[in-house]
Every structure is written in C-alpha cells, then in structure tokens.
Image (cartoon, helix red, strand yellow):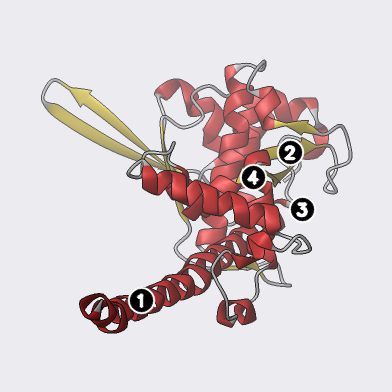
Amino acid sequence: MRELTQIRETQLARYVTEAENALSEAEHAFRADFVGKLQENLLRLEDQRLELNRNLRHRPFHGQYYSFIKHPEPDLRQVLDWVLDWSPEQGRDVGGLFDAAADPNHPHRDAIRRVRGLLMEAASSEGKAGGWDERLADYRQYYHFDVRMSDDSEGGGNPELLSRRLSKGSGGEHQSPFYVAIGAALAAAYRIERRNDGTLRGGIALAVFDEAFSKLDLQNTVSALGFLGELGLQVILAAPDEKYGQIAENVDTIVNVYRDGGSVYIDTEYIKPEARLALAADNPVLRADPKQAQP
C-alpha cells in the first residue's frame, strides 16, 4: 500500500500534470492554428474570388458576362459554418477541446462532434480514414467552384454554368471559358488597374500561350484576343500559319519562323494602323457587324 500510495502521489501525479499540459497545448494549437488559419485562408479565398469577378464585371466575352461562383460542399457545410463563425476570443476559452459537443444548446455542436469523430477515426486507422484529416485542413475542399455565364453583368440574363456546358458543348465552347478564367486570374495576379483616364497600371502583364485558340472559331478567337487586351494583358502567342488571318489584325508584331533543312529563318512584321484597318475590312465577323469595323 505504501508503494501504491507513493506511485499515485508522485509518479502518477507527474504524468497527470504532463498529460494535462499536453492536452492544453493541443487545444490551443487546434483553436489558434488549425481553426484560425483555416478561417484566414477561407476569407482570403473569398477576397480573391471577388477580385476576379471585379475584373470580369464590365468586360463581356463574346456577348456574355462571366463570374466565378462557389457552393459549400454538403458534407463539410456544418464544419464550414463553425470555422467561419469562430473568433480569436474563442481560441482563449478555458475548457476541453470538444466540450461544446456535449452542450445541446451550442450552435455548432454537430460540427464539433463530427470533427472529433473524423480526427479520431483518422488517428485510429493511422491517417488512412479516406483522407479526412488532410481534407479538413485544406480550405479548397470546403467549396465546389463553377463559372456562371449570362447575358448581363448582374448574372440574371439566361444564366448557364460551365459545368453544364462541358457536358454538351463543342470543343470551342469548352475552351472559351478557360481563356476568360486565365485572363481574369492573370489580371488579378499582376494587379492591373484601369485609371480614370483609361490608362492601365500594374505588373509586366505577360500572358503566354502555345497553340493558342487552336479549337476556337474566328469569332471566338477575335473575342478572346480583344478580351485579353481589354484586361490590360500583353499577349505573346505561338500559332500555326493557318491562324494568320484570324489573329493578324489583333496583334502588334508577328514573328514568322521558317525552317529549311538545318537552317531557320526569322521574318518580323509590324502591323500598322492602315494594315489593321485593311485586315478588319476583310474580316467576315466584323463585316457582319459594321460597328466593329470602325477604327
């Protein structure tokens, strides 16, 4: 009994204290690091989405306005609501990490219980519980993203989702939205802004494409180049000779590369305003709309 008493009062007491300290550190790490950083990433994600949509709001592509939308993933909706509702003050709360799961009045009780179960499941199976432990920490997994296309900038005129178009449209219809997405993302990354006088400010603003617009028809190609230019991007593209008629009037410089055996020849053309007008006059798309053919 003396030995048991000594163990209980000395050695076990020390282990209990160490365990309590470890639990406290784990709780603080989860609240301050995991939840806090996840919330920060989710809020930054929303800021980036809004920035992309600002670049697209007044710039139609082929008569349609594009916007990026997101919907919460159904199986993570409760956890998402809990994380977004979290505040730094809650990170300093005293109490067990999952004490709220036992409170029937807690607004996020079900989410907390689910996170506890998922983490315990992942731990018991050595991190192989369907990737749940990794999925909980990845802010990109909490939403399903899509692109909405409509006839007006408010998104109310004949809206269509990219996910639905991909299931039925042609190759060109599939490619067009991706040029919009790439252009908007680059404009945001370069932080391009249009001043009140119409001039642009931002980074180097290069947009480089290989085999550019290979599946787009003439009308979509013209729209894509015009859209990228309207965003303030400087486009550098590589295209085969048969694309010359589609792109010549929309570029400033054309570098022709010829190969003859082991020799390579380079010839450069500079498209001046007179040549641009002449090319536009021969463009069947612009001829169909006299307003676009005007300089």
Q: Secondary structure at mark 2?
A: strand
Q: Earlier in the sequence, mark 2 or mark 4?
A: 2
The amino acid type found where label 3 is placed reads: His
Label 3 and label 4: CA atoms lie apart by 11 Å
Q: Measuring 59% from the left and 60% from the top, which residue is drawn there?
A: 42
Q: Secondary structure at mark 3?
A: loop
Structural distance between the alpha carbons of marks 4 and 1: 66 Å
Of the image marks 3 and 2, the number of the one nearer the N terminus: 3
| Quadrant position of residue 257 | top left
Residue closest to the far right? 157
What secondary structure is found at the residue carrying circle 4?
helix
For the residue pair 263 and 273, the one nearer the viewer reads as 263
Q: What's the mark number on residue 16?
A: 1
Whether the residues at callouts 1 and 2 have beta carbons within 8 Å, the answer is: no
Please identify, in this view, whether the residue under mark 3 or under mark 2 is nearer the observer.
Answer: 2
Give the amino acid type for the residue marked by disc 2 in the picture.
Arg
Please indicate whether residue 55 sits to the left or right of residue 65 in the image.
Answer: left
Quadrant in which the N terminus is drawn? bottom left
Q: Which residue is mark 2?
A: 148
Q: Earlier in the sequence, mark 3 or mark 4?
A: 3
The answer to whether the residue labelled 3 contacts the one labelled 2, judged by CB atoms less than 8 Å apart, is no
Tell me the residue at 63%/62% (across/down): 83
Q: In terms of depth relative to the viewer, which is nearer, 63 or 128?
A: 128
Residue under numbered circle 3: 58
The three-letter code of the residue at mark 1 reads: Val
* Gap between marks 2 and 4 measured at Cα: 17 Å
Q: Is residue 108 left or right of residue 113?
A: right
**Which amino acid type corresponds to the residue marked 4 in the rendered image?**
Phe
- Please tell me which of labels 3 and 1 falls first in the chain: 1
- Whether residue 217 is visible to the viewer of this picture, yes or no, is no
